[in-house]
Image (cartoon, helix red, strand yellow):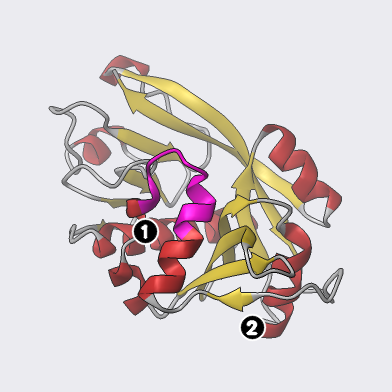
Amino acid sequence: MNDVVSAARNNAEWCAAMATSHGLASHFGTQAWTAPARTPLFYPDAVTLVPNADITALLTQIDTTTPGASIKDSFADLDLTPAGFHILFEAQWIHRPPTAPESDLPWAVADTPASLHDWALAWDDGAGNAALFRPALLKDPATFVLAGRSPNGDIVAGAIATHTAHGVGISNVFGDAWPFILNAAHHLFPAQPLLGYEQGDDLTTALQHGFATTGPLRVWLHT
């Protein structure tokens, strides 16, 4: 399995975990993961799992009749414009082989409703979306909410790690997180590669911490 296919599948499994934590059903098909009802804020209604997915079949599995439908085109090879979509953003999949950590910065897993709430408030930084991360997420055995704390105990950096058969997906990175993420990943998943996607300055930062790009992706939004 190549790096982009692995990253797409891992990311889809994280999207499925978020949907489940909100009480939403979803489905893994041979070409895509899809959710028939609108998914949580910032999360797509579909993630393609193979190149050149069948657009007609894909669109029958999501809701395009209510505002906000979105599709993660994992291989940046679909033209969804005729179906009423426009490109919301483009990014690059990233990959880092399992290596020793860059530092011994302290870290912890937020594994209680209270610690998850504290983590979500730090991630949100006052935008009003902290409730996106619900306690039900803690029931997912593949999800690890990583928190980096300052000497006085405040959460100053964080990320979500999704451990699947395809690697460890890193998402929702905030603060100066990569040094402690790499430390945590080395201890929790010492033989697993790290996967994810980034764009802009966040991509530059990830590359500075040993990641390499493996291919482009697009997220399409229905207008």
Q: Residue at x 62, y 50 (%)?
A: 174
**Residue 53 among magenta residues:** no
Residue 122 in the figure: left or right of residue 15: right
The span shown in magenta is 120-130
Where disc 2 sits, the SS reads: helix
**Residue 129 among magenta residues:** yes
Q: Is residue 161 above or below residue 186?
A: above
Q: Is residue 121 above or below residue 162?
A: above
Q: Residue at x 45, y 50 (%)?
A: 50
- Quadrant for the C terminus, please: top left
Residue 171 in the figure: left or right of residue 58: right
Amino acid type for the residue under numbered disc 1 = Phe
The percent coordinates of residue 45 (x first, y second) are 29, 43
The percent coordinates of residue 12 (x first, y second) are 41, 56
- Quadrant for the N terminus, please: bottom right
Amino acid type for the residue under numbered disc 2 = Leu
| CB within 8 Å, label 1 to label 2 | no
